[in-house]
Image (cartoon, rainbow, N blue to C red):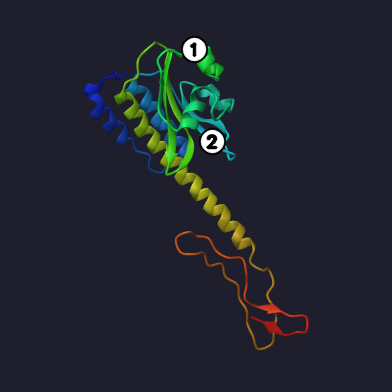
Amino acid sequence: MAESGSSDAPSRLHVIAEVDLSGLSAEDAAARLLDVLRDVLAVDTAVVLLTDPTGTQLEAFAASGLEEGVRQRFRLPVGGGFAGRIAATRAAAVLDDVEASEVLNPILLRKGVRSTSGVPLVVGRTLLGVLHVGATHQRAFDSDDVAVLQLVGERIAHAVYAEQTSTDRATALTLQRSLLPGRLPEVEGLEFASRFVPARGSRVGGDWFDAFALPDGRVAW
């Protein structure tokens, strides 16, 4: 494993920046970056927790060295425990000497994590989750270590955001297209058609139509 230290900070950042995430899902991209992060920072655990749809809970999403938490879908409230406080403050944090009262994840304690550091995952104004690492020996995470964490956090956050946005748009598109009428008016001398035309850029469209059959047989449009 690489040793922590400010003298090799640029090379460590370069290693993180060069990790190829092409074609990977957000989960696989996070897993790959966490494995590299553990080696670069010489730590024993690396975990990503994402906010749930309500924005009040964090749930384990990907891990290296703490995979048990992901399998158990470990959750904690935003504002609670070390990771929860990072989410609530949206600021990086370091805990040089972990105390049982300061963490909510029992797996961390069973693993013997003595020191930890973490950063929020944010894109724009959107909080997506938290990334944190841990060492089973007591150590002091310095500003260069945090800079590495922040770069990894940025890459993971953008991968997650892109995937979530793509899924949301696909869901909206399917819903909006389902609102097109299944049967159009049949009027002699006229031909009707329906189309879904999303607004430019946003991919959001309307759900109203401009031709209607009236009770007396006339057609309004």
- The quadrant holding residue 209 is bottom right
Residue 25 in the image: state x and y as whole percent: 46, 41
Image height of 95 relative to 121, above or below: above
The reply to whether residue 25 is in sight is no
Quadrant containing the N terminus is: top left
In the image, residue 98 above or below residue 31: above
Residue in view at x 75 percent, y 84 percent: 217
Task: Give how far across and how far down residue 167 sits, in percent.
Answer: 53, 48
SS for callout 1 = loop
Q: Quadrant of the C terminus?
A: bottom right
Residue named by callout 1: 99
Q: Position of residue 107 (x, y in %)?
A: 54, 17
Q: Is residue 137 visible?
A: yes
The structure residue drawn at horizontal position 34% and vertical position 26%, both measured from the top left corner, is 146
Q: Nearer the viewer, residue 57 or 40?
A: 57
Residue 91, placed above or below residue 66: below
Mark 2: amino acid: Thr
Q: What's the amino acid at mark 1? A: Glu
- Please identify the residue farthest to the right as the structure is shown: 216
Q: Residue at x 45, y 33 (%)?
A: 90
Q: Residues within 10 Å of mark 2 (few under 14, many from 20)?
A: many
Disc 1: CA contacts within 10 A as few (<14), some (14-19) or many (>=20): few
Cα separation, mark 2 vs mark 1, equals 24 Å
Which SS class for mark 2? strand
Sequence-first tag of 2 and 1: 2
Look at 29% across and 19% down and name the residue there. 4
Residue 120 at x, y percent in the picture: 44, 32
Question: Where residue 166 is drawn, which disc sits there?
Answer: none
Up-down: is 3 above or below 50?
A: above
| Disc marking residue 51 | 2
